[in-house]
Image (tube, rainbow, N blue to C red):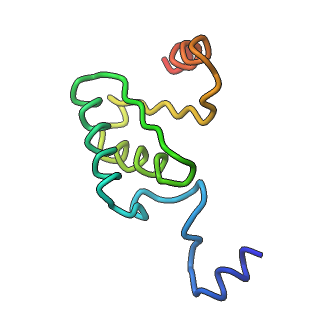
Amino acid sequence: MLDKIQSFFGFTTMPYGRGLAPGMLFSSSDHAQAAARIAYGIATRGITVITGEVGVGKTVAARAALGRTEPARHHLIYIPDPTVGARGYLELLRDCR
């Protein structure tokens, strides 16, 4: 099915999905705000939380922000399941060391 969609529209890669490269980010005012929040979190060495509806580009925005950082100094923690609860968040943070 995906091959048919790519062929019909002439896509070389699919314009959606989990594997989007940061360069494929459509820069809207919402994405600019997300990027600014992520940059603020990095600058203040704080924890930044980005939330939104499915498919709005949260993961791509986070990957784009991470691409502008020094990997040795910064660590992105991606939590795809918001139902992990407080204890789950603490475990995820502990495991990132």
Tell me if residue 13 comes above or below residue 96 in the rendering. below
* Relative image position of residue 40 (x, y in whole percent): 24, 33
* Relative image position of residue 93 (x, y in whole percent): 51, 17
Residue in the image at 59% along x and 14% along y: 91
Q: Residue furthest front?
A: 53
Image-based side of 84 in relation to 60, left or right:
right
Image-based side of 67 in relation to 90, left or right:
left
Quadrant location of the N terminus?
bottom right
Query: Hey, which quadrant is residue 79 in on the image?
Result: top right
Residue in the image at 55% along x and 54% along y: 55
Residue in the image at 61% along x and 16% along y: 88
Image-based side of 44 in relation to 73, left or right:
left
Tell me if residue 41 comes above or below residue 21 in the rendering. above
Residue in the image at 32% along x and 37% along y: 38
* Relative image position of residue 81 (x, y in whole percent): 63, 32
Query: Hey, which quadrant is residue 28 in on the image?
Result: bottom left
Query: Hey, which quadrant is residue 85 in on the image?
Result: top right
* Relative image position of residue 33 (x, y in whole percent): 29, 46
Figure disc tally:
0
